[in-house]
């Protein structure tokens, strides 16, 4: 059997693959996962991060930021994931040394006595619709002295002195919840930002009863009635513990590009993993320099990181039947063949990072570990309370 993995080591990053203990019985109802059960039973626990209920970033965001060294100073243990500049780079822009925040068009639903953010992915917002709304918002933003870059019409990047140390919550952290505690605030004081509130209000008024929204509502789709601020930060010199990165997430790809790592889209299955050098994505240039000009800092013997995300939407929507289906597909497409590859020696090490909405668990398993029959860890032991 041919070797398909660089250095025969694979790391799977799985956002929202770890349900909270309270949801586990529903999420995993009637799931049969013998391959994953065996991998977990024999694996070595590398890290368990419990997290907190009101952290504004998501565990997989904090994990990638830590892995690449993207947290400034002593912030490694803080509730920070300043990923916007790397997202901008992945989307085709150049962040330079400026501080950037990611801003997305969203729908905020009026509930009985509060406002609720819905998952931006559920908007089904086309690029054409987003481009029209962006054209309306851009002059309003620029008039306030804020720089805007929008290489993708559904994801914008703003840079302005008035935003200071404004901390926003990840959209998927706030989705489905009362937005009051998740609105942007000054990181050091907790105060609301007048600069941001003014900008947000200007855009909201400009979009109110806009023809794009009227047409969407006529089709039964939610209007685009606000914007959401998150991930603010400035690019740092980063390093990669991975030899290559296969992910659709802008933050993960941007970190890899900045570190000079080969990148590409995640394959549909373990069997479809491309050979090293065949990911079809970007990497550091021929001189081995990163986009920022510093020498690439890449672990050439590191594993391949594959980020798979079939779980986010059903997790946020509490659609456990669809989450269950995604889990079953992952079992067939990834866990079973990865276990077989470990048993045959085709794969020397498999690492798993399973994330929920507050915490994460990382494990590693080798071929030798599979023979350690006395290890008896079960999936339920990984759940975050």
Image: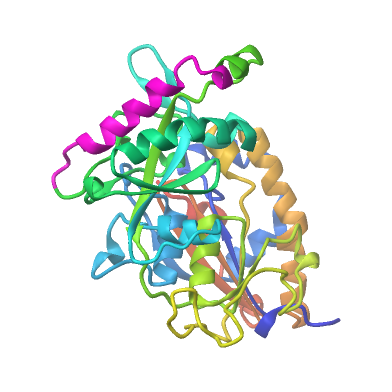
Judging depth in this view, the residue of 376 and 282 nearest the camera is 282
The residue under the point 57% across, 78% down is: 284
How far across and down, in percent of the image, does residue 356 sit? 48, 49
How far across and down, in percent of the image, does residue 81 sit? 37, 57
Image: 304 above or below 269: below
The residue under the point 30% across, 66% down is: 76
Q: Which residues are magenta?
A: 189-213
How far across and down, in percent of the image, does residue 344 sit? 78, 80
How far across and down, in percent of the image, does residue 289 sit? 51, 83
Q: Is residue 190 magenta?
A: yes
The residue under the point 47% across, 43% down is: 20
Look at the image and tell me whether residue 178 can be seen. Answer: no
Residue 198 lies in quadrant:
top left
Residue 93 appears left or right of 189: right
Type of secondary structure dominating the magenta stretch? helix
Q: Is residue 75 magenta?
A: no
Residue 72 appears left or right of 252: left
Q: State the count of labels.
A: 0
Judging depth in this view, the residue of 139 and 161 nearest the camera is 139
């Amino acid at each position: 059997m041919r070797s398909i993995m660089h250095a025969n080591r694979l790391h799977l990053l799985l956002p929202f693959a770890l349900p909270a203990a309270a949801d586990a019985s529903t999420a995993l109802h009637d799931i049969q996962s013998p391959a994953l059960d065996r991998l977990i039973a024999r694996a070595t626990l590398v890290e368990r991060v419990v997290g907190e209920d009101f952290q504004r970033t998501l565990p997989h965001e904090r994990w990638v930021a830590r892995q690449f060294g993207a947290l400034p100073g002593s912030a490694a243990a803080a509730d920070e994931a300043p990923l916007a500049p790397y997202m901008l780079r992945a989307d085709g822009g150049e962040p330079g040394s400026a501080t950037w925040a990611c801003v997305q068009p969203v729908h905020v639903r009026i509930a009985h006595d509060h406002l609720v953010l819905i998952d931006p992915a559920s908007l089904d917002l086309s690029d054409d619709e987003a481009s029209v709304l962006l054209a309306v918002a851009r002059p309003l933003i620029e008039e306030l002295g804020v720089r805007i870059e929008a290489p993708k019409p559904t994801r914008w990047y703003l840079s302005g002195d008035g935003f200071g140390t404004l901390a926003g919550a990840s959209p998927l952290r706030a989705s489905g919840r009362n937005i009051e505690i998740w609105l942007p605030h000054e990181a050091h004081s907790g105060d609301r930002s007048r600069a941001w509130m003014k900008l947000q209000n200007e855009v909201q008024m400009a979009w109110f009863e806009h023809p794009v929204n009227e047409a969407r509502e006529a089709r039964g789709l939610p209007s685009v009635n606000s914007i959401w601020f998150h991930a603010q930060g400035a690019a740092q010199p980063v390093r990669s513990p991975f030899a290559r990165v296969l992910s659709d997430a802008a933050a993960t790809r941007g970190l890899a590009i900045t570190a000079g790592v080969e990148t590409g889209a995640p394959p549909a299955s373990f069997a479809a993993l491309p050979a090293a050098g065949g990911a079809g994505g970007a990497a550091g240039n021929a001189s081995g320099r990163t986009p920022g000009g510093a020498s690439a800092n890449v672990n050439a013997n590191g594993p391949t990181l594959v980020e798979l995300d079939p779980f986010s939407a059903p997790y946020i929507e509490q659609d456990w039947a669809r989450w269950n289906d995604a889990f079953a597909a992952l079992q067939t497409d990834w866990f079973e063949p990865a276990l077989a590859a470990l048993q045959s020696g085709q794969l020397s090490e498999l690492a798993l990072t399973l994330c929920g909405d507050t915490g994460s668990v990382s494990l590693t398993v080798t071929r030798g570990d599979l023979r350690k029959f006395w290890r008896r860890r079960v999936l339920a032991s990984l759940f975050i309370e």
